[in-house]
Image (tube, grey):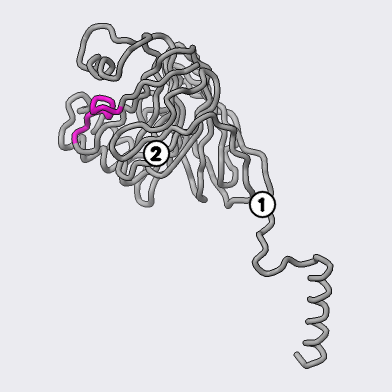
Amino acid sequence: MNTVQKSLTAAAAAALLAAGGAPALGAPHAKSTVIPTPSISVTASKGGTFNVSGPRRFSAGRLDISLTAKKGEQEIAIMRLHKGYTLADLKRDFGTYGQSQQNPTPQGIKALNRIVKHTTFYGGLDTGTGHNSVSGSVVLPRVGTYYLLNDANGPGSSEAVKLHVTAKTGSRSAPAIAAVERAITAKRFRGPTHLPASGTVEFKNDSTNSPHFMFLQHVKKGTTRKQVIKSFKSNGPGPELPGAAGTDVLFMGHAMTLTYNLPAGDYAQLCFFPDLKTGMPHAFMGMVRIVHLS
């Protein structure tokens, strides 16, 4: 480029800057385009019925999900397999773990740890009992193939639905939330203990070493944390009342939202994911908190 061309280019650039045609150095980037959030609805019932409606291909980011239980308690989960690990591997490992779930064996614990090492679960929904519908949203952050699982009887119990996530094309609005509830490394819950009886909360797994989920179980007024933990070892009736809802398994460093409509009252906030060393459900180890819905 000769001297004249350089001068013309500089003059043109100066004119654009003066007219606001180009941002100054250090100016903030323009906001990314807000795009609609894709939505998937699932209807499930006992006997393996699992009907899914909604797109199977969408760009990376937030995904709205809803679950309706035609009969009984139903659960769905969304997960991704790591390279070299297959759905057949997942089914086999869960079968090995499941056979010893009540009295975990070394083989069962190894199978459980293989699942955690070779998959990422991004959350899901649990209708609980006496509550036939629940909704929420998960975030699928990267390009690849994900799987929507009927998790009522564990991963691999029925055919998975493939979800194809493409490159991110814009941002999606996050739902308004009433509170943030967190799971921490010490196998405890943190966050507000007063929640709406009908509304949306965010659940974050801030643990560094274990997956968790959050289940809200209606209990008798005045029930204490110690009473809930003691009830796990009793064969008699527990403090439960009709009304429950929860997330499915959420791996470390991820978050999802849960939208529910439950009776007001006292609730036990629970996680039953098994300990990776002993196989004992986290709630049995003290991951129980009493919260109040109003």
Across and down, in percent, residue 158 comes to 40, 28
Name the residue beneath numbered marker 2.
205
Q: Is residue 36 above or below residue 158?
A: below
* Local secondary structure at mark 2: strand
Q: Quadrant of residue 9?
A: bottom right
Does the image show residue 72?
no
Tell me, yes or no, whether the highlighted magenta stretch contains residue 270. Answer: no
Residue at 20% x, 38% y: name it. Answer: 277
**Of helix, strand and loop, which mostly describes the magenta segment?**
loop
The amino acid marked with disc number 2 is Asn
Q: Which mark is residue 111?
A: none
Q: Nearer the viewer, residue 225 or 127?
A: 225
Name the residue beneath numbered marker 1.
32
Left or right: 280, with 180 as reference point? left
Across and down, in percent, residue 171 comes to 62, 46
**The N terminus - image quarter:** bottom right
Q: Nearer the viewer, residue 110 or 47?
A: 110
Q: Nearer the viewer, residue 55 or 117?
A: 117
Q: Quadrant of residue 249?
A: top left
Label 1, residues with CA under 10 Å away: few <14, some 14-19, many ≥20: few
Task: Look at the image and give the residue range highlighted in magenta.
Answer: 278-287
Q: How many dots with numbers?
A: 2
Q: Quadrant of residue 21?
A: bottom right
Q: Nearer the viewer, residue 26 or 114?
A: 26
Mark 2 to mark 1: distance in Å?
A: 27 Å
Disc with the residue nearer the chain's start (2 vs 1): 1
The amino acid marked with disc number 1 is Ser
Label 2, residues with CA under 10 Å away: few <14, some 14-19, many ≥20: many
The furthest residue to the bottom? 3
* Local secondary structure at mark 1: loop
Tell me, yes or no, whether the highlighted magenta stretch contains residue 279. Answer: yes
